[in-house]
Image: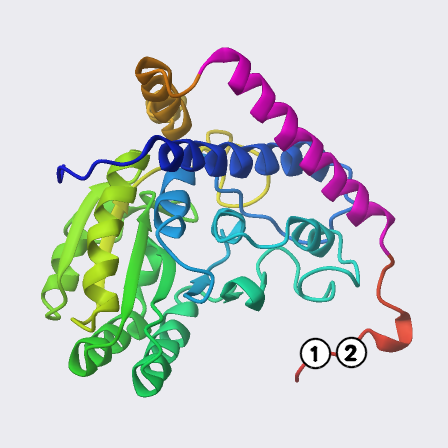
Amino acid sequence: MSGLIIPSEILLKLYIIMKRIRAVELRIESEYHKDEMKTPIHLCNGQEAIAAGMCLNLEDRDYVFSNHRGHGHYIAKNGNLNKMVAELYNREAGCSRGRGGSMHLIDTKVGIMGSSAIVGGGIPLATGAALATKIKRDKKVSVVFFGDGAVEEGAFYESINFAVLKKLPIIYVCENNLYAVCSKLKNRQVTKDIYKRAQGLGIPSKKIDGNDAIMVYTAVNKIIKKVREGRGPYFLECSTYRFKDHHDIKTGVELGYRTQEELDEWVKRCPIKRLEEYLLYQGILHMDLMYSLEQQINIEIENAFEYAKTSALPKKEDVYMYVYK
């Protein structure tokens, strides 16, 4: 789409990040029914290319703000996996000391400034971080991920208006998976192209295939250079689809708000499968390497779950520490 030649090692990293995200989500899915994770979960199976393509272009010092469906963003930005899984089990060793659960992930060492359960809640926070960056002139970029439902919040419009006015170094990333909980996009918004609404606020905007990892990486690679140079904010709409229900481990077909045929059609467009087929065709990936990578990822995940399950719960007398009322 741009003529950018992506080195083989970058393409392989892109693949590994996506495989790692999917493997973690599948392991959470297999463990969740045991009811040991006392937290709601929102899985991102099917949306891995957006997190991977975006975060592979970022530096550790760059800021990422996430939302309720944030496991992929956390993993792609190199968040500590042991601490993330421990947080799902509400352990003191968790990234939020066991008090936040799945929707409140943070690892400031690699620029993950936190995720919010409030729809659109991360948007003004990321905008504020971008303002701080501009004042300090430290060349950081602020990135915020949110779903299509968040563009129905006032904070979305207010934040973008302010970012455009002040030419802030921020990228707004809308992961448009067509549903807000179980409400279809076409039943909530007049136009299907969200990026056009953003354009009306004066922000450069683009819509891309969020299930094409190479397209995401390439688009972000061009955008981030402009943003880091001080040329103002950018809005990126990524078309995608979550394979699971809004929360929990079902598919959404059970509730009747989407059909099995629709789900099957999107599964055929699986971002990992698409990149895998390309890498195999190009000779960058082969079966022995695939097996080796899967083994490494599975060992890492097994260790993370073992770490979480054997870590201590917060002490009863300390349960209100780090909790602000």
User: On the rendered image, what quadrant is the C terminus found in?
Assistant: bottom right
- In-image side of 283 versus 191 (left or right): right
**Which element type, helix, strand or loop, lies under badge 2?**
loop
- Residue occupied by mark 2: 320
Colour convention of the picture: rainbow
- Classed neighbour count for the residue bearing mark 1: other residues with Cα under 10 Å, few (<14), some (14–19), many (≥20): few
Which x, y percent locates residue 185?
27, 47
Q: Residue at x 26, y 67 (%)?
A: 228
- Classed neighbour count for the residue bearing mark 2: other residues with Cα under 10 Å, few (<14), some (14–19), many (≥20): few
| Alpha carbons under labels 2 and 1: distance apart | 5 Å
Numbered badge on residue 294: none
Task: Inspect this view and state whether residue 261 appears.
Answer: no
The amino acid sitting under disc 2 is Tyr
Q: Main secondary structure of the magenta part?
A: helix
Task: Inspect this view and state whether residue 208 appears.
Answer: yes
Q: Residue at x 39, y 22 (%)?
A: 276
Q: Quadrant of residue 258?
A: top left
Which x, y percent locates residue 217?
29, 43
Region in magenta: 286-311
- In-image side of 14 versus 163 (left or right): right
The amino acid sitting under disc 1 is Val
- Residue occupied by mark 1: 323
Marks 2 and 1 close (CB-CB < 8 Å): yes
Which x, y percent locates residue 131?
32, 82
